[in-house]
Image (cartoon, coloured by chain):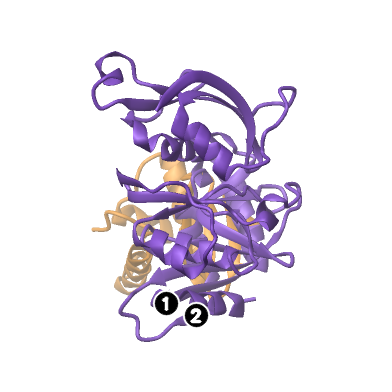
Chain colours: A purple, B orange
């Protein structure tokens, strides 16, 4: 589980990471889910991170690891088998608390032919499952968690990283498409069972500075009992407020956040989508909004 | 998007008929507001800012120049509507 401490520089989405760790599962996860992302020692680093074992008795009994960013430990330690998910959650935290050049919304965002769709959603809404399925049908993943919107232009920027899937969604996506690369499933996390999926090549090969206009904002609502799969327009006003609520830094940005959302909604159509979990139908409904 | 200035109250407005999204830079709040209420809301915010305290209903009547039962009822209805959409809290 532990090895000699190693320092690596790699690109996680659009950010450069310097990681120090001696936890084997973290290094294995990076090899598997961030292939070809190693960068030279000369690159400017955005975040310096350490995933390290908790010292003392926890080193021997039920070992735990902690996420350290610039000597700050923002989270409670987690069991060592959750080290890779901890890295992923920690990276999300780094971006959402520091990158205020963007309005950051808790939402999946995908792009195809220059048009982006944003899918905010509460846990259980099916957002990540639908995001993974769309990416397996030719859409580029900009992000499954953090939509980054430039505050000057209102355009979205890509930040493709592994897709986090939870509980039943893991098997649903594995049966939806064979030959998808997954990390090992980690059980008993705060979010249940968690696995990460390697994004498709067109997502990670995408030019990171190529922005995209958001054409649709869709609020998916997974309901196994739903009698109709349907997508219905909703008002821009209520969408505005929901996006503000789902943003990590709308209040930090103040008026700038307001003007950024105004720019987004000037060009986007807004929808609420009900689907019963049939992914092919879900994809069809999403594509019908463009 | 429009920037409205009512006196020294700065309000940014995003118009999306039949509603408006209003960002109030004094209260640092975002509200969804039916279009007709904007002027009334602006006057309330200006007064709150000047007093640096919440307004009572009587103070709002005074602000709006309500001296008849009819005009008071009209103002109370406006306040209730704003309360219903979460713009005003602690309405008595």
Marked residue nearer the N-terminal end (2 or 1): 1
Name the residue at 69% across, 57% down.
A202
| Residue A196 visible at all | yes
Q: Is residue A242 left or right of residue A261?
A: left
- Numbered-mark total: 2
> Relative to the observer, which residue lies in front, A27 or B65?
A27
Q: Is residue A68 above or below residue A162?
A: above
- Which image quarter holds the N terminus of chain A? top left
**Residue at left offset 68%, top offset 67%:** A267
Residue at the spot 59% in from the left edge and 37% down from the top edge: A99
Instruction: Find residue A32 and report its image quarter.
Output: top right
Mark 2–mark 1 Cα distance, whole angstroms, equals 8 Å
Numbered tag placed on residue A281 in the rendering? 2
Element type at mark 1 = strand
Picture coordinates of residue A198, whole percent (x, y): 56, 51
Q: Quadrant of the C terminus of chain A?
A: bottom right
Residue B7 seen in this snapshot: no
Q: How packed is label 2: few (under 14 Cα within 10 Å), some, or many (20 or more)?
A: some
**Left or right: A42 in relation to A72:** right
Q: Name the disc covering residue A275, or none.
A: 1
């Amino acid at each position: 589980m532990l090895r000699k401490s190693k320092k690596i520089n790699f690109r996680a989405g659009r950010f450069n990471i310097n990681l120090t760790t001696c936890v084997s599962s973290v290094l294995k996860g990076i090899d598997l889910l961030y292939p070809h992302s190693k960068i030279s020692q000369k690159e400017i680093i955005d975040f310096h991170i350490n995933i390290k074992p908790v010292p003392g008795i926890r080193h021997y009994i039920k070992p735990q690891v902690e996420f350290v960013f610039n000597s700050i430990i923002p989270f409670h330690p987690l069991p060592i088998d959750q080290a890779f998910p901890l890295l992923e959650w920690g990276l999300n935290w780094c971006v959402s608390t520091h990158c205020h050049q963007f309005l950051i919304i808790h939402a999946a965002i995908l792009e195809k032919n220059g048009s982006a769709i944003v899918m905010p959603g509460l846990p259980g809404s099916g957002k990540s499952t639908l995001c993974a399925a769309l990416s397996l049908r030719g859409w580029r993943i900009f992000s499954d968690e953090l939509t980054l919107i430039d505050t000057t232009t209102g355009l979205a920027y890509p930040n493709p990283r592994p897709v986090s899937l939870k509980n039943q969604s893991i098997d649903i996506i594995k049966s939806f498409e064979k030959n998808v690369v997954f990390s090992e499933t980690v059980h008993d996390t705060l979010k249940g069972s968690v696995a990460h999926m390697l994004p498709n090549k067109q997502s990670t090969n995408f030019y990171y500075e190529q922005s995209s206009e958001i054409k649709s904002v869709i609020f998916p609502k997974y309901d196994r009992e739903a009698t109709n799969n349907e997508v219905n327009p909703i008002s821009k006003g209520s969408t505005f407020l929901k996006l503000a609520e789902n943003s990590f830094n709308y209040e930090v940005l103040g008026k700038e956040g307001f003007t950024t959302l105004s720019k987004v909604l000037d060009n986007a159509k807004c929808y609420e989508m009900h689907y019963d979990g049939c992914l092919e139908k879900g994809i069809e409904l999403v594509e019908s909004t463009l | 998007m429009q920037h409205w200035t009512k006196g020294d109250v700065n309000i940014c407005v995003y118009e999306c008929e039949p509603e408006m999204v209003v960002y109030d830079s004094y209260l640092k709040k975002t509200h969804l507001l039916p279009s007709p209420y904007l002027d009334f809301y602006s006057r309330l915010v200006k007064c709150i800012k000047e007093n640096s305290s919440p307004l009572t209903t009587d103070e709002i009547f005074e602000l709006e120049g309500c001296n008849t039962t009819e005009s008071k009822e009209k103002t109370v209805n406006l306040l209730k509507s704003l309360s219903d959409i979460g713009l005003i809290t602690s309405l008595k």
